[in-house]
Image (tube, rainbow, N blue to C red):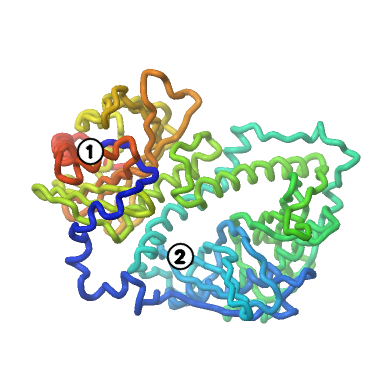
């Protein structure tokens, strides 16, 4: 099981076309239509179509983003309530990147469905497209992910689980747990970046005569929450609050650029508390920082009931990125901002940190797998997103439907997958070892040379945290090459959200680059994009162990030789793994207590 993994695989379109499908025996009848998406609709799916009227638009004749956010929140809330069977409130919204503006007279089509339910919260995926009814053209506007919490007055809510049917639903369901984990550590990520990394700014070197004082952009506005702004329980719609926030943020941005700004992105944010009918909501906005072609506006929302109240409740804070477009829709240069001493300078530097994280997240998390370089530079500022990408890439590979059974020897199965110009393989067996034991034994890559001859030596370079570690691996020459290989591997492990009944234990592996471990003449540097193990609990002391790997050109000959049955090295290595697990299953009693 060599660890080199995939780039483009030309000329392999029909190598394994005659193999038996992994799913064919169990799904021949009932689910064939579902697999193709015909005759099946997600039971939580809600669709909304709105004609954009002049009352919905801004000064440019384009749909106001605030109005769009209200429609997005309403559609997502209806989807969440359809699954929960009770009222739901908006808890958070992930990053939203607006790819296309919507003009008056066009139609907005919004589709929302629940990706996954947890205990009392659920992730809702939203897709927004626009449609020109005259030209019949359509555009993707944005995608969004929102978290909703189910709420009952008397009893505690325990949501039923989502059962994904299609390949897309399985991928979203699987990755939702990893996205939830990333949301929970987001605030700590900002703090760590500010504490441990030097944020570059050039305040002292900028020409102060061409800088706009940040205080000039400050905006404060109050809104009274009335019944039309709230749901049937009297709680203010999250979308309504977002619309008011977008309004004051736009005013602040206009005060800096003296033009009509366009909102391009909204940072991930959380609602910290509820708001009800009768609340007075105070919105405060200011431009935190201006970069070459974009600016960040911070918005804070506080609530109070009566004017005499001395304590105001913090409802929400958000950060919005604006640009100013010229007649050709190209971003214009913006004036520099001069922050106020103290809190102003803190907000200025935090905006630079958020921009760094936003670029990391967009580069590592948002782009397609085929667009990500095999080895991404690792540093403390992007470790959360590299770990996320590492685990989610493996989960998406596991969730694919079109795996094909290539061979089976003594209950060890070999599957293959040809998809998106990648050739992947998957080994599977059932072992008489507890899933948590197998997970712990294979988590430490330093023990892999005990059973895998393709690992000559493994050095722990850095223990990043409890779940992530970086290793330097050397392996013998492979695929006709004379030089041995070495790898710098990020290993990310995850325990299941549901005690292993649906979610597996996961060990994900991918290449990273480190300045301390550059390529040397002694070794040929290898790379892996997506590989690792999954462990499903099949019963008491019974675990299904699966290994996944995408093949790179450097090991293609080795992989296809095994897949075609001309070599049994895959089988021999996997059986050695099984024996390693059986021989060491009693060594982990203290460690198992922490799982």
Q: Quadrant of residue 6?
A: top left
Q: Quadrant of residue 231?
A: bottom right
On the rendered image, what quadrant is the C terminus found in?
top left
Residue at the left extreme, as displayed: 410
> Please, is residue 225 above or below residue 123 in the view?
below
Residue at the right extreme, as displayed: 209
| Residue 122: mark | 2
Counting from the top left corner in percent of width and height, residue 400 is at: 32, 58
Residue at disc 1, secondary structure: helix
Residue 304 visible from this viewpoint: no
Residue at the top extreme, as displayed: 522
The residue beneath circle 1 is: 589
> Please, is residue 308 above or below residue 194 in the view?
below
At 74% from the left edge and 48% from the top edge, which residue is drawn?
293
Counting from the top left corner in percent of width and height, residue 492 is at: 38, 41
> Please, is residue 400 above or below residue 152 in the view?
above
On the rendered image, what quadrant is the N terminus found in?
top left
Counting from the top left corner in percent of width and height, residue 224 is at: 74, 73
């Amino acid at each position: 099981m060599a660890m080199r993994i995939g780039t483009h695989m030309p000329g392999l379109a029909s190598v394994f076309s005659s193999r038996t499908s992994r799913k064919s025996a169990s799904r021949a009848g009932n689910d064939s239509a579902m697999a193709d998406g015909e005759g099946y609709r997600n039971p939580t799916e809600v669709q909304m179509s709105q004609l954009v009227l002049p009352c919905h638009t801004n000064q440019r004749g384009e749909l106001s983003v605030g109005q769009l956010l209200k429609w997005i929140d309403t559609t997502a809330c209806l989807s969440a309530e359809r699954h929960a069977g009770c009222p739901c409130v908006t808890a958070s919204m992930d990053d939203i990147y607006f790819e296309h503006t919507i003009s008056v007279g066009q139609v907005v089509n919004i589709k929302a469905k629940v990706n996954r339910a947890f205990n009392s919260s659920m992730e809702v995926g939203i897709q927004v497209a626009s449609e020109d009814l005259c030209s019949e053209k359509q555009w993707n506007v944005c995608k969004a992910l929102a978290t909703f919490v189910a709420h009952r007055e008397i009893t505690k809510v325990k949501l039923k689980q989502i059962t994904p049917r299609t390949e897309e639903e399985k991928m979203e369901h699987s990755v939702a747990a990893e996205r939830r984990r990333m949301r929970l550590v987001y605030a700590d990520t900002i703090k760590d970046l500010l504490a441990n990394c030097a944020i570059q700014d050039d305040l002292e070197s900028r020409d102060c005569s061409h800088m706009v004082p940040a205080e000039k952009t400050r905006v404060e506005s109050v809104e009274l929450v009335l019944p039309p702004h709230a749901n049937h329980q009297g709680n203010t719609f999250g979308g309504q609050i977002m619309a008011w926030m977008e309004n004051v943020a736009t005013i602040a941005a206009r005060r800096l650029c003296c033009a009509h700004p366009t909102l391009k992105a909204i940072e991930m944010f959380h609602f910290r508390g509820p708001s009800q009918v009768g609340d007075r909501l105070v919105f405060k906005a200011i431009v935190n920082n201006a970069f070459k072609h974009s600016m960040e506006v911070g918005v804070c929302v506080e609530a109070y009931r009566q004017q005499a109240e001395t304590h105001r409740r913090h409802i929400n804070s958000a950060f919005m990125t604006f640009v100013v477009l010229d007649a050709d829709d190209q971003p214009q240069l913006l004036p520099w901002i001069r922050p106020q001493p103290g809190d102003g300078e803190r907000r200025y530097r935090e905006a630079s940190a958020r921009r760094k994280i936003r670029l990391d997240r967009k580069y590592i998390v948002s782009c397609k797998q085929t667009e990500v370089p095999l080895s991404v530079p690792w540093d403390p500022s992007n470790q959360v997103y590299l770990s996320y990408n590492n685990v989610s890439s493996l989960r998406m590979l596991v969730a694919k439907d079109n795996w094909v059974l290539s061979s089976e020897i003594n209950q060890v199965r070999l599957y293959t997958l040809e998809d998106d110009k990648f050739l992947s393989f998957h080994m599977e067996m059932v072992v008489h070892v507890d899933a948590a034991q197998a997970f712990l034994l294979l988590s430490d890559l330093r023990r892999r040379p005990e059973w895998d001859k393709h690992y000559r030596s493994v050095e722990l370079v850095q223990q990043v945290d409890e779940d992530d570690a970086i290793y330097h691996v050397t392996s013998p020459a492979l695929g006709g090459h004379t030089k041995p290989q070495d790898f710098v591997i990020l290993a990310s492990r995850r325990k299941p959200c549901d005690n292993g009944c649906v979610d597996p234990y996961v060990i994900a592996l991918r290449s990273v680059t480190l300045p301390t471990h550059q390529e040397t003449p002694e070794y040929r540097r290898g790379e892996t994009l997506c590989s690792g193990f999954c462990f499903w609990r099949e019963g008491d002391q019974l675990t299904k162990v699966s290994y996944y790997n995408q093949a790179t050109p450097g090991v293609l000959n080795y992989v296809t030789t095994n897949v075609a049955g001309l070599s049994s090295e895959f089988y021999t290595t996997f059986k050695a793994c099984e024996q390693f697990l059986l021989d060491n299953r009693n060594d982990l009693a203290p460690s198992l207590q922490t799982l």
